[in-house]
């Protein structure tokens, strides 16, 4: 059974969605980041960057236990472990990986900044609000163009790119985004939200 260390954040949801989709048995260990539990010494041994999510798989490579942090790395590991949600065809595989990296490098970090300055900053910072809301809208436009005429991010089949992007898209109110302005993304969000394993994954912990 895989041990999942997580909290109710978009990055955490990525991995719980993947575990549910792959039907892998897992045990949830909530790490309350509001109480700074991520800085506990025992968690540091699992996640050296003090961030959730992290996993420990007792049946890792060569049957040996492995601990992993960074949500994108975990998604790739689980996809390779199960042979699911990562295309085998080389070009499709590269397409999936590049959109996963797009999420990790942009549609996550910059949206996270929008969340902070829109909702959590102790006082308004107009420059930061304008900067990150503008970038959020640009990133949504990129995603809308990519999804135009497609069911999922890289084509007709679900991949880890969808699992990585969806939880961040679902925080659209924190980004001052109206999904109605991005019809291809809105259709995709409705499709993703109707999948049972996505519903379960979005409720963890």
Image (cartoon, grey):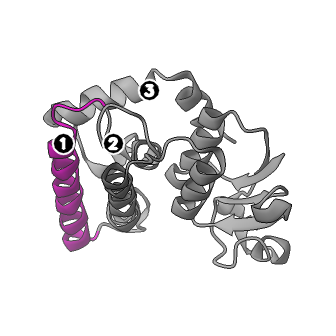
How many other residues sit within 10 Å of disc 1, few (<14), some (14-19) or many (≥20)? many
Return the mark for residue 156.
none
How many other residues sit within 10 Å of disc 2, few (<14), some (14-19) or many (≥20)? few
Q: Between tags 2 and 1, which lies in front? A: 1
Q: Is residue 173 left or right of residue 49?
A: left
Q: Which residue is mark 3?
A: 193
Give the magenta part as a residue range. 125-151
Q: Quadrant of residue 24?
A: top right
Sooner in the amino-acid sequence: mark 2 or mark 1: 1
**Could you say which is closer to the camera, residue 123 or residue 35?**
35
Q: Secondary structure at mark 2?
A: helix
Cβ atoms under marks 1 and 3 closer than 8 Å: no
Q: Is residue 139 left or right of residue 22?
A: left
Is residue 183 located in the magenta-colored stretch of the structure? no
**Could you say which is closer to the camera, residue 156 or residue 9?**
156
How many other residues sit within 10 Å of disc 3, few (<14), some (14-19) or many (≥20)? some
Return the mark for residue 144.
1
Return the mark for residue 173.
2
């Amino acid at each position: 059974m895989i041990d999942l260390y997580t909290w109710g954040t978009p990055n955490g949801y990525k991995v719980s969605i993947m575990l549910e989709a792959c039907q892998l048995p897992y045990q949830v260990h909530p790490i309350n980041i509001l109480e700074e539990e991520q800085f506990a010494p025992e968690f540091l041994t699992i996640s050296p960057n003090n961030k959730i999510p992290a996993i420990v798989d007792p049946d890792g490579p060569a049957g040996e236990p492995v601990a992993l942090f960074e949500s994108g790395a975990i998604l790739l590991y689980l996809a390779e472990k199960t042979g699911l949600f990562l295309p085998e065809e080389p070009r499709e595989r590269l397409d999936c990986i590049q959109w996963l990296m797009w999420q990790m490098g942009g549609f996550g970090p910059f949206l996270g900044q929008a969340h902070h300055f829109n909702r959590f900053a102790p006082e308004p910072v107009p420059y930061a609000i304008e900067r990150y809301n503008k970038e959020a809208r640009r990133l949504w436009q990129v995603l809308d163009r990519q999804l135009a005429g497609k069911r999922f991010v890289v084509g007709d089949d679900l991949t880890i790119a969808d699992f990585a992007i969806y939880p961040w898209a679902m925080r659209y109110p924190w980004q001052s985004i109206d999904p109605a302005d991005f019809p291809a993304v809105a259709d995709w969000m409705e499709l993703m939200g109707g999948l049972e394993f996505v519903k379960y994954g979005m409720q963890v912990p």
